[in-house]
Amino acid sequence: MLHSTDRILTTHAGSLPRPRALFELLLARQRGEAVDAGALTTAIEAATRHAVAQQIAAGIDVGNDGEQGRESFVTYVRDRLSGFGGEHRRPVMRDITHFRSFLELRAPQFARDQVSLLRTPQAIADVRHVDGGPLARELDTLTRVLGEQPRGFAETFVTAASPGIIASAMGNAHYDSPETYVMAVADAMASEYEAVAAHGVLLQIDCPDLAMERHTAFADRPLDEFLDWVDLNIRALRHALRNVPADRVRMHVCWGNYEGPHVFDVPLEEILPRLYQIPVGALLLSLANPRHAHEHRCLTRHPLPDGWLLIAGVIDPTTNYVEHPEVVADRLEIAARAIGDPHRLLAGTDCGFDTAAGLGTVAEEVVWEKLKVLSEGAGIATKRLRF
């Protein structure tokens, strides 16, 4: 995993805007409508080519395919795992329902066409990994597209949902306990994780379950019960990653990729020491949004494990405000001071820009501008920190 040896490297959290034509195909497939396989393949490849080119043009060092072929960052697994069907109604985040005027203000946004993360398939039979084809096609497409570029990424990553967020988002109507369910998912996803690493790219594990579930599934329950759930999901993730070298894995933890009050978010202080139990080489944290920008202080009280990198979220993917490069540089300086070594720091985004097709709230052109500013700010911080 590349360190920021000569300058602060740039990356992002994974999902990028999908073109309208691809979005419509993914939405139709999610609804169970017939979709022409050839048309979908063509649209995915074209969208991947565009996403890769835009990242390179913006100066992104560590990039990916923008998750163009996936309907969402988590429900994509139903094409790869057996045992899912029916419908699960996921609880709405507590901060959204608590403020009625906010809910009314955002009602038109909630009602628009998008791939839903609140109405998902659930486990109705044994969950097993049954099809490596989708991942192989993703990797082949990304490799081919990168080969067309005159200049590629310094390093490439591929995202994957954690066992905990799959078990959280896609309910259980089959297993006799949450533990049995999440461990079955861990067994099923292990081969996906291993295949990504074997392909020679970095694996990014997306773990919003380790923070967001506090104000979702555990909103009405004691903090200790949520932390027990976190501990269970960490055990499951450790099991799933047992054959993947830690220095080939980066982990993304967040409180939900949506613009909202977030007043019920669990503090990073409560979960950070637990996160350090997971065998990874880098941690991506939200440090840009107004609710969590102060939590760089936690990294001083709880230093990163030896060898770990921090991917600091210094761009907010939920607002069309474009951060000034000087603001990005300021945030990176603060993060560098918190961890004590700028060579262990990468510049990133708090979360993805389109975690489910149609869910993104930032205009596509603004997304590319934000990534460009990310690179500009990293350049300013590099000079300030005297690499």
Image (cartoon, rainbow, N blue to C red):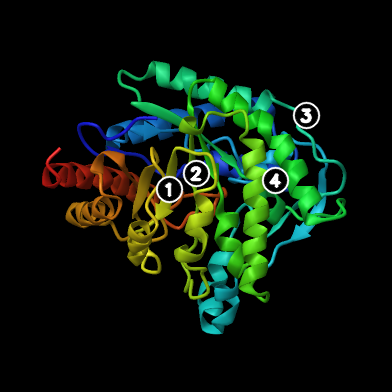
Q: Position of residue 65 (x, y in %)?
A: 47, 32
Q: Residue 251: which numbered mark, if any?
A: 2
Amino acid at the residue labelled 2 = Met
Residue drawn where x is 50% and y is 77% of the image = 105
**Which badge, 2 or 4, is on the more N-terminal residue?**
4
Q: Is residue 55 left or right of residue 109?
A: left
Q: Are marks 2 and 1 in contact (CB under 8 Å)?
A: yes
**Which badge, 3 or 2, is on the more N-terminal residue?**
3
* Gap between marks 1 and 3 measured at Cα: 30 Å
**Which badge, 1 or 3, is on the more N-terminal residue?**
3
- Nearer to us in this view, 148 or 294: 294
* Gap between marks 4 and 1 measured at Cα: 29 Å
**Which badge, 2 or 1, is on the more N-terminal residue?**
2
Q: Position of residue 249 (x, y in %)?
A: 50, 35
In this orientation, does residue 158 appear? Answer: yes
- Nearer to us in this view, 138 or 337: 337
Q: Residue 284: which numbered mark, if any?
A: 1
Q: Which residue is mark 4?
A: 30
- Nearer to us in this view, 323 or 306: 306
* Gap between marks 2 and 4 measured at Cα: 27 Å
Q: Residue 130: which numbered mark, if any?
A: 3
